[in-house]
Amino acid sequence: MARAAADDGDGSKNAPSGERRNRQTPYEAIKRAILTAELPSGQQLVETELAAKYKVSRTPVREALMRLEHDGLVARLDRTLYVRTRSREEVLDIYDTRIIVEAHAARLAAERRTSNDLLFLKQIADRMAAKKPNDVEAMADINEAFHRRIWQCTRSETLIDLLERVNLHLARYPASTLSFPGRWDEVNHDHAELLDAIEKRDVDRAGEIATEHFAKARDIRLELWSNEDLN
């Protein structure tokens, strides 16, 4: 699931988990179930079962599954829908795409940012630097908030939409690279350098830092997979 910013501004972060779940649309609920592996890869998706599970009619479930198919989280074989599985090669291809679009976003952010953008970025960066690397979910949330703020600096709806879609494809692997030994300190260092480049409107440097930052994430993913194979 594409992680939300650290605070959505509507108080929902403070609501009990059951209450938040009740507020979700069928689309949001099924997407969350897929991204948290409650509905695992390869799981067949049956409208009647999902309608009963989420206490809704089949129509909103059908519409949700169509959206999720468009998002690339659900696949169709003949007339059967199931949770899409991904190969390692495909995920790495998504990472390579992300490197390109995130670097472009960083360059545009350096060019188009405002003083308010800098204020928000610095606040998030300070909160990140103060956070201990012992809560992987919280680390992922605040890291996502930092990058989403950079996306907003671009003022490009088309680019933001593309970044949302790329991020969604990687959302089933949201936080494991951040828990890699030494990665949290490295991320904070990269973010400080990127923020400095954006503040100075150094377009080329911002793009270079973003490229290196996400290439490291891709390489860590490769190492994690290699370790899994050895085990």
Image (cartoon, rainbow, N blue to C red):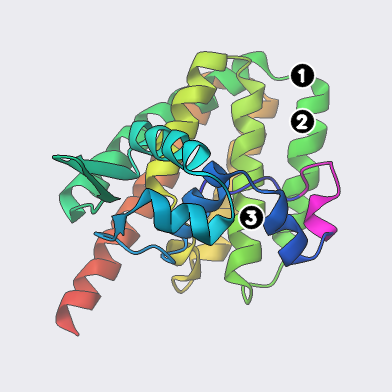
Q: CA distance from mark 1 to mark 2?
A: 7 Å
* Residue interval drawn in magenta: 7-14
Looking at the image, residue 206 lies above or below residue 33: above
Between 188 and 74, the one nearer to me in the picture: 74
Badge 3: residue crowd in 10 Å (few <14, some 14–19, many ≥20): some
Q: Left of 62 or right of it: where is 139? A: right
Looking at the image, residue 211 lies above or below residue 176: above
Q: Position of residue 143 (x, y in %)?
A: 61, 51
Which label sits in the foreground, 3 or 2? 3
Q: Main secondary structure of the magenta part?
A: loop
Residue type, mark 1 in image: Thr
Q: Are marks 1 and 2 in contact (CB under 8 Å)?
A: yes
Q: Judge whether residue 12 is colored magenta.
A: yes
Q: Secondary structure at mark 3?
A: helix
Quadrant of the image occupied by residue 225: bottom left
Q: Which residue is mark 1?
A: 114
Q: Which residue is mark 3?
A: 141
Q: Judge whether residue 77 is colored magenta.
A: no
Residue type, mark 3 in image: Asp
Q: Which residue is mark 2?
A: 118
Badge 1: residue crowd in 10 Å (few <14, some 14–19, many ≥20): few
Q: CA distance from mark 1 to mark 3?
A: 23 Å
Looking at the image, residue 61 lies above or below residue 229: above
Q: Left of 231 or right of it: where is 201? A: right
